[in-house]
Amino acid sequence: MPKIRLQMTPEMEMKMELEVEGIDPDRDWDVQQHKAEVYAEFERRMQAAFPEGLRIYSFEFGLDRGWHDELKDD
């Protein structure tokens, strides 16, 4: 199962790695077909980070085309 890197926008940029089955990790369209899984994992991580609660007004995502230097694996 390929591991994909996602970038979420617009007001806050977040990076996330997620294993998604049955996609070409170079095709954004393939990733968009798994929005429910991507959102569920994002929501799970945000709820763990902010147990008091949060509200998400919009959610956009796509394949990440480059890591920030501080997030690169050494």
Image: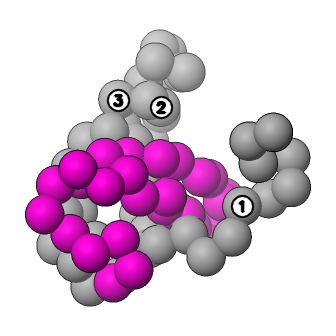
The number of discs equals 3
List x then y, in percent, for residue 28. 35, 82
Q: Which mark is residue 67?
A: 1
Q: Position of residue 66 (x, y in %)?
A: 69, 70
Q: Secondary structure at mark 1?
A: loop
| Residue neighbourhood size for the residue with mark 1, other residues' Cα within 10 Å, grouped as few (<14), some (14–19), many (≥20) | few
The residue wearing badge 3 is: 44
What is the crowding at mark 2: few (fewer than 14 residues within 10 Å), some, or many (at least 20)? few
In 3D space, how far apart are the residues under numbered discs 1 and 3 (Cα atoms)?
22 Å
Pointers 1 and 2 in contact (CB under 8 A)?
no
Q: Look at the image and give the residue range highlighted in magenta.
A: 1-27
Taking the spot 20% from the left edge, 69% from the top edge, the residue there is 23
Describe the element under mark 3 as helix, strand or loop.
helix
* Residue contact between numbered discs 2 and 3, judged by CB atoms under 8 Å: yes
- The C terminus - image quarter: top right
Compared across the picture, whether 35 is left or right of 18 comes to left
Give the x, y percent position of residue 5.
49, 58
Q: Amino acid at mark 1?
A: Trp
